[in-house]
Amino acid sequence: MLLAAVLVAAVPAALLVGVVMMLLGHVVAGLALFGGSVLAATAAVVLAGMSGARHLRKLVAESSSHIVQLGRGDYTVYR
């Protein structure tokens, strides 16, 4: 989770540096930095998604052990 947060925080900084580089005449390097920031954002989203899915699976596995199926005699039906 920390890595995903760092990657997301680095994207705006990379975009700003890319704009400055392009203004100073380094167009190719600025475009490469833009591409790198897009890849970093994609990696952050994938990493957070995988981490969230793993956490959700763990929660479901823990809660499924507490599920008890009731029989007919365990509850009353009011008609």
Image (spheres, grey):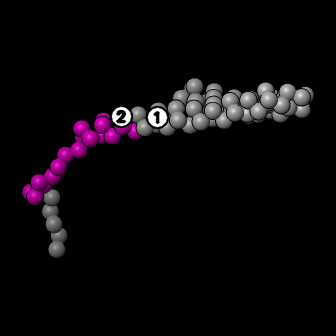
Residue at the limit of the structure toward the left, as seen here: 73
Q: What x and y, as percent, mark residue 41?
A: 63, 35
Q: What x and y, as percent, mark residue 5?
A: 61, 30
Residue in the image at 68% along x and 30% along y: 36
Identify which residue, 61 or 35, lies in the foreground. 35
Q: Which residue is mark 1?
A: 50
Q: Main secondary structure of the magenta part?
A: helix
Q: Which residue is mark 2?
A: 58
Q: What x and y, as percent, mark residue 47?
A: 52, 32
Residue in the image at 40% along x and 39% along y: 56
The amino acid pointed to by label 1 is Met
Report the span colored magenta. Answer: 56-74
Residue at the limit of the structure toward the bottom, as seen here: 79
Residue in the image at 15% along x and 58% along y: 75
The answer to whether 62 appears left or right of 16 in the picture is: left
The amino acid pointed to by label 2 is Lys
Residue at the limit of the structure toward the front, as seen here: 28
The answer to whether 4 appears left or right of 64 in the picture is: right
Q: Secondary structure at mark 2?
A: helix
Foreground tag (1 vs 2): 1
